[in-house]
Amino acid sequence: MALLRWSAPGDLFRPFEEMEREMERLRAEMDRLLPGFRSLRTARVGVFPPLNVSEDKDNLYVRAELPGMHPDQIEISVEGDTLTLRGERKPAPLGDNVSYHRREREFGRFRRSLTLPTRIDVDAVEATFNNGVLTIVLPKAQEVRPKQIPVKAQ
Amino acid sequence: MAEKDIELREKQEVQTQAESTRNIPVFIPAVDIYESEEALTLVADMPGVAPENVDIDLRDDQLTIRGTVSLEGEGETVLLREYGVGDYYRQFNLGRIIDQSKIEAAMKDGVLTLTLPKVDKAKPKKITVKTG
């Protein structure tokens, strides 16, 4: 059996501290290599609903799976560079004398915020709900869209 | 019932299945199954699946649910990926109590509801105790 000396807690935790420092270093390196990821990565994870974010030339796309929800039950707001999703997933009312065999689907309230990686045109945000998947289309602000610069011939 | 915050339940991937021809993951849909006097009801979450892409197969006592997802956002660059997108697959063994000819299915907003009526003899009967 290994004996640990409690008089020297510093030694005991040193490996963890080193690991933490290494993680911090890697994180800093990631930020340096992928600056666009910084704000997105720091968003809270492990929170409902999980989000998928993608982009193309003109828009950002944020998607969430919210099966069985009605668009009226989902509140979407954009303030500055923060997108917030709020709502409540309610179970369908059951009749009397009903017993459960399995209960795996989750219900309840949720609130999720995401910091957007680029500036967007707040007035032109649109959302659609299709087969239980919410898609929010956020047009990028004019000044951050890539521009084609034509080369003039002399 | 008191209001509560929804808990995140990670999508579970199917581990054992014949390999599919589509190169995307296959998930186990979360289901609720409840029983009333007349029927069993199965509710499955299959977000991203259109009603015409649900396939329900009943063979002997085995019920198979398959959902083919409609992929969105192809051609976009992924910035953050917190959930996987894929098809759905799950099998259940139905007991003898189900009247297999009367099964009904409805698909709305990514939720499949299957109503499985019980055969008459499986429905509860009141038994009166005779006195005397």
Image (cartoon, coloured by chain):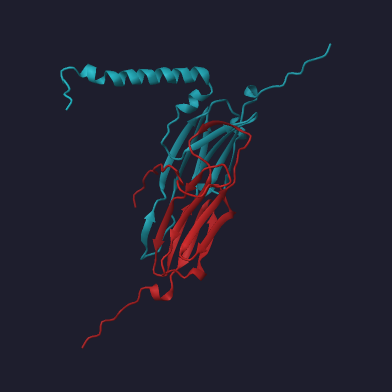
Chain colours: A cyan, B red
Viewer-closest of A152 and B114 = B114
Viewer-closest of A51 and B16 = B16
Position of residue A37 relative to residue B51, above or below, is above
The residue lying furthest to the bottom in this view is B132
Which residue shows up at 39% across the image and 66% down it? Answer: B36
Which residue shows up at 52% across the image and 18% down it? Answer: A33
Residue B29 location, x and y as percent? 47, 50
Position of residue A26 relative to residue B38, above or below, is above
Position of residue A66 relative to residue B94, above or below, is above
The answer to whether residue B46 is visible is no
Which residue shows up at 47% across the image and 38% down it? Answer: A50
Residue B10 location, x and y as percent? 43, 42
Position of residue B86 relative to residue A17, above or below, is below
Question: Splitting the image into 4 quarters, where does residue A100 fall?
Answer: bottom left
Left/right of residue A20 with respect to residue A80 in the rendered view: left
Viewer-closest of A15 and B107 = A15
Quadrant position of the C terminus of chain A in the picture: top right
